[in-house]
């Protein structure tokens, strides 16, 4: 019986031995082996780093970390590699992990500070460099980087002040200097791009915003700046789309919200004005354009168009002087705005300010040499030439489309008014002036009563070849009134009371 029990016990023990787990230490490399393997990976990483093959270096440093995740220097090396790849946020994480593992790791603190600096966080960078100097007071690199962080802070303050004062050129200058230290700071790039847009340098602003969107398509600030450029280039519908997208990414983005509201209001008010103008309600159009101009003073191109539109409405209302002022305001905002030059030139023509009109038409023709612009310039030059001669229509007091009878009646009235005999009792000075006017009236009648001469005069041709310098105003007067003896001038006792009598 005892033998049987012993046999059973022995068999059970044998079964237990067979089922016992294998010692885990037998299949897991010893810690020393892992550390050796990690060092090999690190050395390979170093070799690639020296050859500037940073992607390969990154891979081997990662293998070293996987093999030995508690080694601070491996994180430090990978952080250095990520910095060379301009992956500063990832580098910052590795640097921070390195100093968590070893708070006395000088290179780790230094790299963390550089990452903060590159990302635009000057305060955090300063703390890191201060920590390095506590560990190593003679560290020249930390000393220099600490100065760089202080300079960055100063440029930030200057830019903030400049933006408040709307000195956008100063802000761009400060951001350019700041980006020399903080090359990966999207905040500085966005501020620079926004100010470039406000300065009208839309292409540069779009370039900066587009670079950021290529790296991060959901960046609300970059979407806002992209929309701002379109808005200021008078592409309002597209601009609204970008503002709306920015608000989807960041519902509290106040600048995008304000810009979106302004864009919609400006578009609506401008369309109202255009519709009123089409309906020939020029007073309403003038008022609506005026209201639109108050919405956003920064929108240069749209406001230039609004000024020109208001000038067009003003010209229809015969507000020519105001129309010229509006065109000048449009040109001040956009010196390349041809339509504003053309509108102003036409207003000058209507006011008979031909020299100013010629100047504007010359500007237009030099910019766009079209047949239409050439014709407008020639017409203005002709009117200028004509304006420098005697205006025979004004001399007779008739319009340029006066009939033959109207010209005769005007001559009769003016010739009798200025005849020398009528002013024989006046002073010598008055007599001389009246004689001059009498001759001008005769000269005007000689030209305007002759269809050929009148046609030449109206076309701007010179009349010197027609013997205009030799005519006798008295002969013209006698011929018109029928010769001597057919009229006489008499006076009352009071000087200057003349009347004439026909024989």
Image (cartoon, helix red, strand yellow):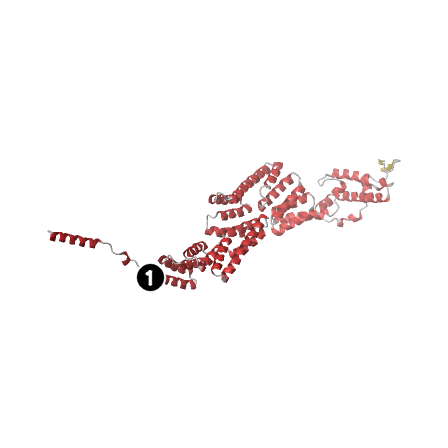
Taking the image as shown, residue 298 lies to the left or right of residue 80, namely right
x, y percent for residue 1: 10, 51
Taking the image as shown, residue 87 lies to the left or right of residue 374, namely left
Q: Between 305 and 115, which is closer to the camera in this rendering? A: 115
Q: Between 41 and 168, which is closer to the camera in this rendering? A: 41
x, y percent for residue 295: 58, 41
x, y percent for residue 311: 63, 42
Residue at 61% in and 51% down: 367
x, y percent for residue 436: 81, 45
Q: Between 342 and 468, which is closer to the camera in this rendering? A: 342
Quadrant that contains the C terminus: top right
The quadrant in which residue 484 appears is top right
The residue positioned farthest toward the right in the image shown: 493
The quadrant in which residue 449 appears is top right
- Using the rendered image of the protein, determine whether residue 427 is visible from the camera's viewpoint: yes
The residue positioned farthest toward the front in the image shown: 2
Q: Between 188 and 336, which is closer to the camera in this rendering? A: 188
Residue at 78% in and 48% down: 468
The residue positioned farthest toward the left in the image shown: 1
Residue that numbered label 1 is attached to: 32
Badge 1 density bin: few <14, some 14–19, many ≥20, Cα 10 Å = few
Residue at 65% in and 42% down: 323
Residue 352 position (above or below residue 146): above
């Amino acid at each position: 019986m005892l033998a049987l029990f012993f046999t059973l016990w022995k068999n059970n023990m044998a079964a237990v031995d067979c089922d016992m787990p294998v010692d885990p230490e037998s299949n897991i490399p010893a810690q020393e082996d892992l550390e050796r393997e990690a060092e090999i990976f690190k050395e390979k990483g170093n070799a690639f780093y020296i050859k500037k093959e940073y992607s390969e270096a990154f891979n081997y440093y990662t293998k070293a970390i996987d093999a030995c995740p508690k080694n601070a220097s491996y994180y430090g090396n990978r952080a250095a590699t990520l910095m060379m790849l301009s992956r500063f946020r990832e580098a910052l994480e590795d640097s921070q992990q390195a100093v968590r593992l070893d708070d006395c790791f000088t290179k780790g603190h230094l790299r963390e500070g550089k990452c903060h600096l590159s990302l635009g966080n000057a305060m955090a960078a300063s703390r890191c460099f201060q920590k390095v100097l506590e560990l190593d007071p003679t560290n020249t690199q930390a000393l220099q980087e600490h100065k760089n962080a202080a300079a960055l802070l100063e440029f930030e303050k200057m830019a903030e002040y400049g933006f408040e004062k709307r000195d956008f050129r100063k802000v761009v200058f400060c951001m350019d200097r700041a980006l020399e230290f903080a090359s990966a700071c999207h905040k500085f790039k966005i501020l620079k791009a926004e100010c470039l847009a406000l300065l009208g340098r839309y292409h540069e602003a779009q370039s900066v915003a587009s670079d950021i969107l290529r790296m991060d398509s959901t960046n609300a600030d970059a979407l806002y700046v992209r929309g701002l450029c379109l808005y200021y280039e008078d592409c309002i519908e597209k601009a609204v789309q970008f503002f709306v997208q920015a608000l989807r990414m960041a519902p509290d983005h106040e600048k995008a919200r304000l810009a979106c509201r302004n864009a919609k209001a400006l578009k609506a008010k401008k369309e109202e004005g255009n519709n009123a103008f089409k309906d020939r309600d020029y007073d309403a159009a003038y008022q609506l354009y005026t209201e639109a101009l108050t919405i956003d003073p920064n929108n240069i191109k749209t406001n230039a168009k609004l000024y020109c539109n208001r000038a067009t409405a003003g010209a229809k209302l015969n507000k020519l002087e105001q129309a010229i002022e509006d065109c000048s305001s449009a040109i001040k905002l956009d010196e390349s705005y041809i339509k504003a030059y053309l509108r102003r030139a036409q207003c000058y023509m209507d006011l008979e300010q031909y020299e100013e009109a010629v100047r504007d038409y010359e500007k237009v023709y030099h910019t766009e040499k079209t047949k239409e612009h050439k014709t407008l310039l020639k017409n203005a030059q002709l009117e200028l030439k004509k304006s420098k001669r005697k205006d025979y229509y004004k001399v007779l007091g008739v319009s340029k489309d006066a009939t033959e009878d109207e010209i005769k009646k005007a001559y009769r009235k003016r010739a009798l008014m200025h005849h020398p005999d009528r002013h024989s009792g006046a002073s010598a000075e008055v007599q001389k002036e009246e004689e001059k006017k009498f001759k001008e009236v005769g000269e005007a009648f000689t030209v305007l009563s002759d269809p050929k001469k009148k046609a030449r005069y109206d076309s701007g041709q010179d009349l010197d070849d027609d013997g205009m310098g030799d005519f006798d105003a008295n002969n013209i007067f006698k011929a018109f009134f029928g010769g001597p003896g057919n009229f006489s001038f008499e006076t009352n006792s009071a000087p200057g009371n003349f009347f004439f009598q026909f024989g």
